[in-house]
Image (cartoon, helix red, strand yellow):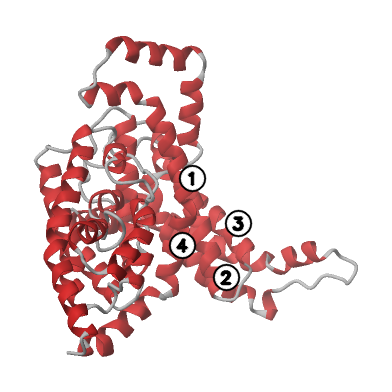
Amino acid sequence: MKFLEEKFVPLAAKIGSQKHLVSIRDAFVVMMPLTIAGAVGVLLACIGQLFAESGLNMPGVQTAYESFINNTGLLTVFGALSAGTIDIMAILIAGLISYNLTNANGGDGLAGLTVGIAAFLCGIKINLAGVDANGNPAATFLNGLLGSSGLFVAMLVGLLVGEVFPRLSASKKLQITMPDGVPPAVAKSFSSLFPAIITLAIVAAIYSYVFKFTGKSFFDVITEVLATPLKGLSQNVFFLIVQFFMIDLLWMFGLHGANIVGSVTTPVLSPLGIENMNNFAAGKEPQNTVTGTMGSAFAVIGGSGATLGLIIAIFIFSKSKAARTIAQLGVAPGIFEINEPITFGLPVVMNVVYAIPFICGPIILVVITYYLMEAGLIRRTCIEAPWVTPPILYGFLATGGDVKGAIWNAIELVLLTVIWTPFVMVNDKVEARQAAGE
């Protein structure tokens, strides 16, 4: 513990506050409401499919619902929810990362946002001549670039703009000074004119020369060089083990492990979750096992460390009045995946007795879930449900209405209670001895 506290924790805290990683993470956090809105559109449009595939096949109800949403125009409304959120996610992410990083570098965040969006769109026209690798018309390919297929390029462009634009804006030689009578908003816009032009020219040059020398668009090159290898690395059980080990180890020292580790994993996992959602909306099976939603729905039962099992074990087996009181306070938030009352109230943080189940519990759950999904026993996650969704309902929604996802959530609660129980009993004995002065 002393070694970790002195050597590991400062390094992890430094990574968690690294401005480039934080800019990416916070951009996806801001996008979360829009992603969920798009997921709601997909869910409502596919309810008939959900019933058919979950074993609740009711042809009459299914046909009536599909006729209703078609005849009333609601199907178009549901499609628009997805089109205005998930399908243009790359544009928004490019702007939001530029905004965050420009602010972090002391620049004008709003100007950085607009330049970031424009810079991302600079390269789109290169893909409009001809077809994509699958022979689809360029317009079809364009739709993919604005959504999940363009996310890696959007992140790179956002980071580039966030570094270059504020530095150019800080140069007095590139600023246009307007007379005193000019409105401040107009003067501010002109002061960033040359920095914006230069930044956009740099990004446009990168797009153009990559295409000239490789014969491929920048999007294709990044997919081959970066996106595909990262996807391959993430789609295995060892990635999950390391991810959740790091999250919960950091929490044991009072650091927000999900935020710190999420700074690294979010850029990799978010596009894969969106890809699964798009496949599901198109009537196809999702292909990516490891996504951000997979961990939220099946490893974080009651919050980091899967502490809902701890609460149940305390209610059943603990004789400590203090522990039972804190469990009563923590049960309602815990159902909605919020466990700070438990982690800091019992406490779990810096508690050696609870460290083993807190770290190992989520790893056990996510490893089993991985193999269940790989075996086809549970559908891979394909709906971005809110992270505060209660267990069982979360498992059902995240897997696109798969009843087996809900059943597995219920089994997980029992398994977690079994895992936590012996440590609750040991902790009771430790507290009793401390109270007796031993």
Residue assigned mark 2: 103
Disc 3 from disc 4: Cα separation? 17 Å
At label 1, the amino acid type is: Leu
Instruction: Name the residue that disc number 4 marks.
Output: 26
Disc 2/disc 1 C-alpha distance (Å)? 22 Å
Q: Are marks 2 and 1 in contact (CB under 8 Å)?
A: no
Q: Nearer the viewer, residue 325 or 254?
A: 325
Near mark 1 (Cα within 10 A), the count class, few <14, some 14-19 or many ≥20, is some
Residue 244 visible? The answer is: yes
Q: Is residue 21 left or right of residue 168?
A: left
How many other residues sit within 10 Å of disc 2, few (<14), some (14-19) or many (≥20)? some
Decide if residue 3 is on the left or right side of residue 268: left
Q: Earlier in the sequence, mark 2 or mark 4?
A: 4
Secondary structure type for disc 3: helix
Residue 114 is tagged as 3
Disc 4 element: helix
Question: To which quarter of the image does residue 68 belong?
Answer: top left
Which marked residue is nearer to the observer: mark 3 or mark 4?
A: 4
Say left or right for 432 vs 90: left
- Name the residue type under label 4: Asp
Q: Which residue is mark 1?
A: 34
Would residue 379 be seen by someone viewing this image from the given angle?
no
